[in-house]
Image (cartoon, helix red, strand yellow):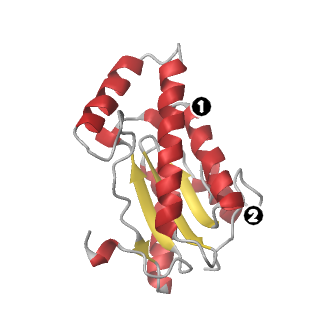
C-alpha cells in the first residue's frame, strides 16, 4: 500500500470510502443500511471510533472519522468491514423478498474466491483509501462532498433531507440517527 493511503495519526480526522464489490446497489434496502448504522454505533461505543460526518449511498459509504487515543483507524475499519460483511450477507441470504439475492451472492462468492483474504464471500472492496484532513480546505471540501453526494445522485433536493447522513446534524442542528463529534468549520 502506498504511503499516500496510510493513517499516521488516528486522532486527526480522515475521509474514508468503503465500496461494495462490483458497485452493487445493496444499500437500496433499508435493512442493510441499518446494519451499517448499528455497526458504526457499536464502533463508537466500544472501538474508539469518533464519527464526525457520514453518508450511506446505494453502493458505498463515506465517513469522516478519527479515533480516540489508544485506538487505530485501520483496526476500527477492519473490524467494521468484517462484521458488516457477515451480517449483510446473512441478511441478504435470509431475505425472502430480495429479488436479486442469487445474483448478489454469486457476485460476492466470485469475488471471495478470487481473494485469498476471504473464506467464502467478499462484500466490501478491500481498500478504503484514507485521506488525512489536515488542512481546513481539505476538511471543508470533503465535508461538503460527502453531504452533497445524495443531492448530486438525484436522491434528494437538499443534503439535510437524506436520512442516512449526518447532514441533519449540521444543517438543521438537530440530532440525526448516529451520535457525532461535530466538526467546527
| Earlier-in-chain disc, 1 versus 2 | 1
Residue at the spot 64% in from the left edge and 74% down from the top edge: 68
As rendered, which of 102 and 147 lies closer to the eye?
Answer: 102
Which residue is label 2 attached to? 173
As rendered, which of 87 and 33 lies closer to the eye?
Answer: 87
Distance between the Cα atoms at labels 1 and 2?
A: 26 Å
- Residue 104's place in the image compared with 65, above or below, is above
In the picture as drawn, the residue positioned furthest to the top comes out as 96
Around disc 2, counting alpha carbons within 10 Å, would you say few (fewer than 14), some (14 to 19), or many (20 or more)? few
Secondary structure beneath disc 1?
helix
- Residue 116's place in the image compared with 181, above or below, is above
Which residue is label 1 attached to? 31
In this view, the mark in front (1 or 2): 1
Q: Quadrant of the C terminus?
A: bottom right
Residue at the spot 47% in from the left edge and 86% down from the top edge: 135
Q: Please give left or right for residue 134 compared with residue 31 in the image.
A: left
- Residue 73's place in the image compared with 91, above or below, is below
- Residue 179 is labelled as none
Amino acid at each position: 500500500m502506498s504511503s499516500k493511503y496510510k493513517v499516521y495519526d488516528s486522532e486527526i480526522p480522515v475521509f474514508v470510502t468503503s465500496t461494495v464489490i462490483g458497485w452493487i446497489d445493496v444499500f437500496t434496502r433499508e435493512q442493510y443500511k441499518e446494519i451499517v448504522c448499528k455497526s458504526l454505533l457499536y464502533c463508537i461505543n466500544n472501538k474508539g471510533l469518533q464519527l464526525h460526518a457520514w453518508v450511506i449511498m446505494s453502493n458505498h459509504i463515506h465517513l469522516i472519522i478519527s479515533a480516540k487515543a489508544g485506538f487505530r483507524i485501520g483496526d476500527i475499519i477492519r473490524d467494521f468491514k468484517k462484521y458488516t460483511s457477515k451480517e449483510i450477507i446473512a441478511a441478504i441470504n435470509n431475505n425472502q423478498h430480495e429479488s436479486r439475492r442469487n445474483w448478489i451472492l454469486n457476485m460476492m462468492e466470485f469475488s471471495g474466491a478470487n481473494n485469498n483474504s476471504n473464506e467464502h464471500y467478499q462484500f466490501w472492496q478491500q481498500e478504503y483509501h484514507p485521506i488525512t484532513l489536515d488542512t481546513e480546505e481539505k476538511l471543508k471540501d470533503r465535508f461538503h462532498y460527502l453531504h452533497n453526494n445524495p443531492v448530486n445522485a438525484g436522491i434528494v433536493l437538499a443534503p439535510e433531507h437524506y436520512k442516512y447522513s449526518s447532514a441533519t446534524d449540521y444543517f438543521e442542528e438537530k440530532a440525526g440517527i448516529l451520535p457525532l463529534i461535530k466538526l467546527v468549520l
